[in-house]
Amino acid sequence: MTLAETCPTIRRIGVLTGGGDCPGLNAVIRAVAMDALSCGIEVVGVEDGYLGLIENRLRPIGDRDLVGILNRGGTILGSNNKSNPSAFVVGKNPPPPMGDGKPILKDVTPKCLDNLRQHGVEALVIIGGDGTLTSAATFNRLGVPTVGVPKTIDNDIVGTEITFGFQTAVAVAADAMDRCRTTADSHHRAMVVEVMGRNAGWIALHSGVAAGADVILLPEIPFDMTSIWQKIIHRSKRGRKSTLICVAEGAKPKGGQQFVGKIDPTSPDPIRLGGVGKWLADEIETQTGIEARYVVLGHVQRGGTPTAGDRVLSTILGNHAMTLLRQGKVGRMVAVQGGKLTDIDLEEPAGKQRLVTMDDPVVHAARAVGTCFGD
């Protein structure tokens, strides 16, 4: 049964991709739009995330827009991670002593609702991370039937055990570490590779295990430098040519703080982590005398062609979003739990992060093969 048959009043849906870009976004757009178009429902794409909704930049999506996008990275709609409709930056206070220099925020949600009505959009499929989905829940509460699709390479959204984009990020990071290992072997160095993940260590854990990293440092386990030095020196004495260290950007030493690379007050997520990789490499050289280098993978983990696994997952999640709309189950987020497709309340992931636990089987397996977590 089609959405048009189940919900005869809905004839046009909107699709929006918010937050940071991610491999697999286009595959979700394709799955949603092809499903809708096949049963006579018009599809409107919102450009550049919530910014396009605020600025009234919406455009029709047709069959031609969907050709060849399954394996394309990024998003054909564009995205934005600085446009929260409930707290949109409309200006800036003067600097001291006349003011505090902070951004001036305004709730522009009513304007977004007007723009949706102007374009005849009667339901939304919103694809994004926790911040994007928090705003999606707001639109659903205000009467716009909304279904969310979880997106982030960090794999840290509460309520689902995997998000699309994660598998691609892990594959990219593991490949980079494989390459770093060969050059580290050639020069008998310690090589530190810093990966993304914010406050969650999923990318570091999985890519580190995949690359056979000797040390994996996670935000969830504050590390002791002594244990890392001991690991490096022990490997050197045993004739190992190198030590490969995978560190999450949010990792921190025991009793210390996370390394902040930048603070952007105009962003809903103002803290930009970074710098732990360089700090580690410097400390290793100083304390052990062993030459160390560091690599920050950064946005390379978010770009490029999604893996086959992410393309499949994106397609499944996009299809399930349309299934929920057909069933009239709105205010929901599609999810994977216990390896099975399901859905949860759209409000559930708001303000939360899914973190690595110490009883995770990947952590257990890594310890069993001699991986040091710095604890």
Image (cartoon, rainbow, N blue to C red):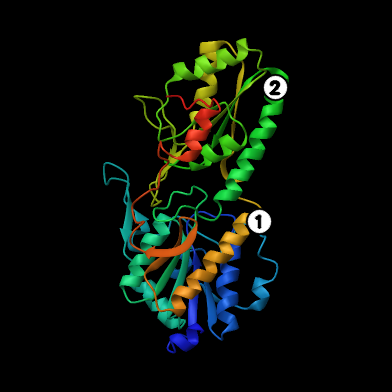
Name the element at disc 2.
helix
Judged left or right of residue 112, residue 165 is right
* In the foreground, 158 or 101: 158
Check the image and report above or below for 17 versus 292: below
Q: Residue 25 location, x and y as percent?
A: 57, 61
* In the foreground, 186 or 114: 186
Which residue is the site of mark 1? 308
Which residue is the site of mark 2? 185
Q: Residue 260, located in which quarter of the rendered image?
A: top left
Q: Amino acid at mark 2?
A: Asp
Q: Amino acid at mark 1?
A: Ala
Q: Nearer the viewer, mark 2 or mark 1?
A: 1
Name the element at disc 1.
helix
* Neighbourhood count class around disc 2 (C-alpha, 10 Å): few under 14, some 14–19, many 20 upward: some
Q: Residue 136 location, x and y as percent?
A: 39, 66
Judged left or right of residue 305, residue 245 is left
Q: Choose the circle earlier in sequence order: 2 or 1.
A: 2
Check the image and report above or below for 145 versus 361: below
- Residue in the image at 55% along x and 76% along y: 59
> In which quadrant will I find the C terminus?
top left
- Residue in the image at 38% along x and 78% along y: 114
Check the image and report above or below for 203 versus 329: above
* In the foreground, 76 or 126: 126
Residue 287 in view, yes or no? yes
